[in-house]
Amino acid sequence: MTNGLQHMVFVAQDGVKLVADRGGDPAAPAVIFLHGGGQTRHSWSRAVERLLAEGFQVINFDARGHGESDWSPTGAYALSDRAADLAAVTADLNAPFILVGASLGGATSIVAIAQGLKPAGLVLVDIVPEPDARGIDRIISFMRGHPDGFASVDEAADAVAAYNPERARPAAGRGLMKNLREGNDGRLRWHWDPRILETQSEFHQSVVREAAHSLESSSDLSVLLVRGLSSDVVSDAGVEAFRRQVPRLQLLDVAGAGHMVAGDRNDAFNDGVIAFARRVLGQGKPAMPSKITA
C-alpha cells in the first residue's frame, strides 16, 4: 500500500484482469477514474492524491489493453466490453460514486450509463459525442506511429514532444517508462495493445452518439464537461451540440490546457473535479455555475 492506495485486480466478465489502485474509506462516496486511450491510470496520480486527502474513496484502474491490465486474447476492445469492465469495477461499491473519464474513458462512461450503470455524477474530460475529427485523427496518428518502437526512452520522449509541442518535453525517466514495454528484441514500445486501433474511430463515435441519448432522460444525473481551451478535440460547436442534448450540462473551461487537461493544468482540473464531487456526493458545498473558466 502506497499513499493510502491498495494495489488490486478486478476480473472482467470475459476473464481479462484489470489492475487498479484503490484507497480511502470503503464506506465513503467514491470517485472512479477512467484514463484516455494510450494513457494509464498513472495519468491521474495527482488528482487521486487530492481526492484521498479530501476524504473520498478512489478507484483508479488501467483499461483493458493498457498499462498493467491484460490485453484481451480475442481483441475484445469494443466500448461495450469496456463498459462491462466498468460495471465489474463498481460492482461491490456500497456508496454513491461519480465517474471521471478522459477521452476514451469518457466514451466508456457514456456507454456504461446507457447499459444501466447508475453513477451520481459524470465528469467528461475533453470528450463530447460530436468531437472534432481533426483532433481525433491526430491522436490516432500518434498512437499508430512508431510501430517498430524506440531504441531508447529519449526517442520516446521526442515522439511525445513532437505530438504536444506546447507542453514541456517529458523527462526520459521512470515516469515515461510506465508507458512503455520492452519487447523481446530489446526495443521499447507503447504499453497498449495495437489491436485497440483495429476498429475505425468513426464506428466508436457512432456508438457514443447513440449511447448519449440515455443522458437526455437521466435528469437526476449531474454532468460536468471539462474542456481544455487549447483542445483540438472539443470545439465550441461540439459543446453547443452536447448542451442542446443535455441542457443541464455544466462546463469548466481550463485555460492553458489542451486535450490532456489533467496533465496540462492539474491544479485547475483538481479544483473543478473536487468541487463537483463535493456537490454531487452530498457534502454540502454550493452548486457550481454552468460555466467556469479556470
Image: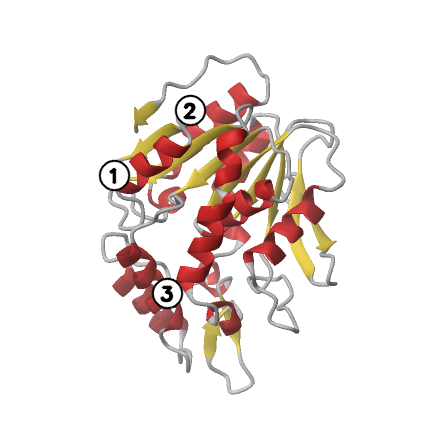
Q: Nearer the viewer, residue 147 or 205?
A: 205
Q: How far apart are marks 1 and 2 (CA)?
A: 17 Å
Above-or-below relation of 268 to 105: above
Assign the C terminus to one quadrant of the image.
Answer: top left
Q: Which colour scheme is used?
A: secondary structure
Secondary structure at badge 3 equals: helix
Q: Is residue 284 visible?
A: yes
Check disc 2 and give the amino acid type: Arg
Q: How crowded is mark 3: few (under 14 residues within 10 Å), some or many (20 or more)?
A: some
- Figure disc tally: 3
For the residue pair 249 and 97, the one nearer the viewer reads as: 249
Q: Which residue is drawn at 44% across and 47% down?
A: 209
Hey, which quadrant is residue 96 in on the image?
A: top right
57 up-or-down from 257: above or below: above
Q: Name the residue under label 3.
A: 140
Q: Helix, strand, or loop for circle 2?
A: loop
Residue 224 at x, y percent in the picture:
43, 31
Q: How crowded is mark 2: few (under 14 residues within 10 Å), some or many (20 or more)?
A: some
Of the residues shown, which amino acid type is indicated by label 1? Answer: Asp
Task: Pick whichever of labels 2 and 3 is earlier in the sequence.
Answer: 3
Q: Name the residue under label 2.
A: 248
Specify whether residue 44 is in view: no
Badge 3 amino acid: Ile
Residue at the spot 68% in from the left edge and 46% down from the top edge: 87
Left or right of 63? Residue 14 is right
Q: Name the residue under label 1.
A: 236
Q: Which residue is nearer to you in this view: 277 or 186?
A: 277
As helix, strand or loop, the secondary structure at mark 1 comes to: helix
1 or 3: tag closer to the N-terminus? 3
Which of the 4 image quarters holds residue 3?
Answer: top right
Whole-number angstrom distance, CA of label 1 to CA of label 3: 22 Å
Mark 1, Cα crowd under 10 Å, few <14 / some 14-19 / many 20+, is: few
